[in-house]
Image (cartoon, grey):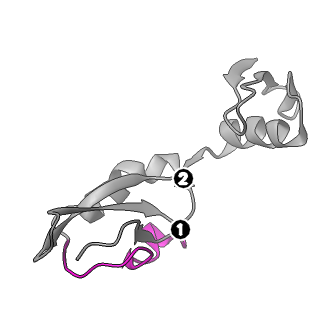
Amino acid sequence: MKHLICIVCPKGCHLQVDENNNYEVRGNSCIRGEEYGKIELTNPTRTITSTIRVSGGKQRRCPVKTDRPIPKSLIFDAMKLLDGIIIAAPVHAGEKVVQDILGTGANFITTRDID
């Protein structure tokens, strides 16, 4: 039995997930909590946020994030992809910086405009 706190909504339900009983979830207040409990133990994913360097802009760094969650096991390899990337200003929010991160279908996108 694993114990988790659900992060899908602000309620923070205390979940108990029984790995030996087809990942049965207890303690959730909604269906989203049940889905979270199962996914967190079978294939945990995360949205990554970071920054990359900018040349010729008012700011030296631009925030980026994945446009969808990627498997937790790939986080450090995905972060290595951002090392050495330099983009030229102007930068617009939503621009793809890295496409199809490690074959996941997710992309790193910029989250801020920089002149």
Taking 7 as reference, is 15 above or below it? Answer: above
Q: Is-magenta flag for residue 73? A: no
Q: Is-magenta flag for residue 96? A: yes
Tags 1 and 2 touching, CB below 8 Å: yes
Q: Which residue is mark 2?
A: 71
Q: Which residue is mark 1?
A: 104
The location of residue 19, given as percent across then percent down, is 78, 27
Residue flagged by tag 2: what amino acid is it?
Pro
Q: Residue furthest left?
A: 56
What span is in magenta?
A: 86-105
User: Which residue is at 43% across, 60% downward?
Assistant: 65
Residue flagged by tag 1: what amino acid is it?
Thr
In the figure, is residue 30 to the left or right of 100? right
The location of residue 48, given as percent across then percent down, is 44, 52
Residue 57 or 80: which is nearer the viewer? Answer: 57
Q: Residues within 10 Å of mark 1 (few under 14, many from 20)?
A: few
Residue 110 or 78: which is nearer the viewer? Answer: 110
User: Which residue is at 15% across, 73% downward?
Assistant: 57
